[in-house]
Amino acid sequence: MQIFVYTIEKKEGFKGEVERYKTLARPFAKLSTISVYDRRLGRASDPRKIYRELLSRYLLTDGLNVILTPDGKLLDTPQFTDQLLKDRSKIAFFIGGSYGFEEEFKKEGFNLSLTPLTLSHQLAKLVLVEQIYRGLTILHNHPYHK
């Protein structure tokens, strides 16, 4: 299984913790995190257009695209595992910047909310990779989830 996590980040946060979960996930899946940023974002009148421009090239045509957005579906861990990870070979998760995504971009995949709380994109990435690892351990009957 290949799992990609794309983020709009000027500076990566929680890098050590994210790398730890990527290493732990290695027996079950190849988990890659890719951060993109463009200096135009600092002066853009609508940064969401640049988010789309930067991330659209990574949308999968042969897998599941998951767009993280506050108005997305809330899933508990078993639902996350069954609906997003189970029986998949390729998944791409997209975490935008502070302005969120345009409606057109959100139509490109399954819309997911990690929590009703507002999280920084760095913290959202850490929570997401932990949930991905947790879901993979559930699928492979590993004791981490217990």
Image (cartoon, helix red, strand yellow):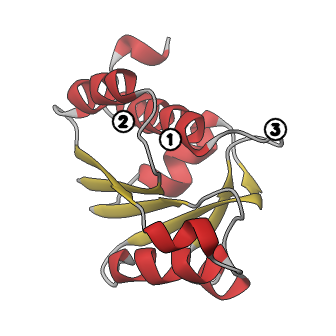
- Residue 56 location, x and y as percent? 43, 82
Which residue in the rendered view is the most extreme toward the left?
A: 27
| Amino acid type, residue under disc 3 in the picture | Leu
Pointer 3: residues within 10 angstroms few (<14), some, or many (20+)? few
Which numbered tag is attached to residue 48? Answer: none
Q: Give how far apart the Cα atoms at labels 2 and 3 are.
A: 25 Å
**Residue appearing at x 66%, y 72% in the figure:** 101
Q: Which residue is mark 1?
A: 125
**Residue appearing at x 50%, y 41% in the figure:** 125
Q: Give how far apart the Cα atoms at labels 1 and 2 are.
A: 16 Å
Q: Toward which corner of the image does residue 78 lie, by quadrant?
A: top right
Q: Which residue is mark 2?
A: 136
N-terminal of the pair, mark 2 or mark 3, is 3
Seen from the viewer's position, the closer of residues 101 and 112 is 101
N-terminal of the pair, mark 3 or mark 1, is 3
Q: Are marks 2 and 3 in contact (CB under 8 Å)?
A: no
Seen from the viewer's position, the closer of residues 2 and 77 is 2
Q: Secondary structure at mark 3?
A: loop
| Amino acid type, residue under disc 1 in the picture | Lys
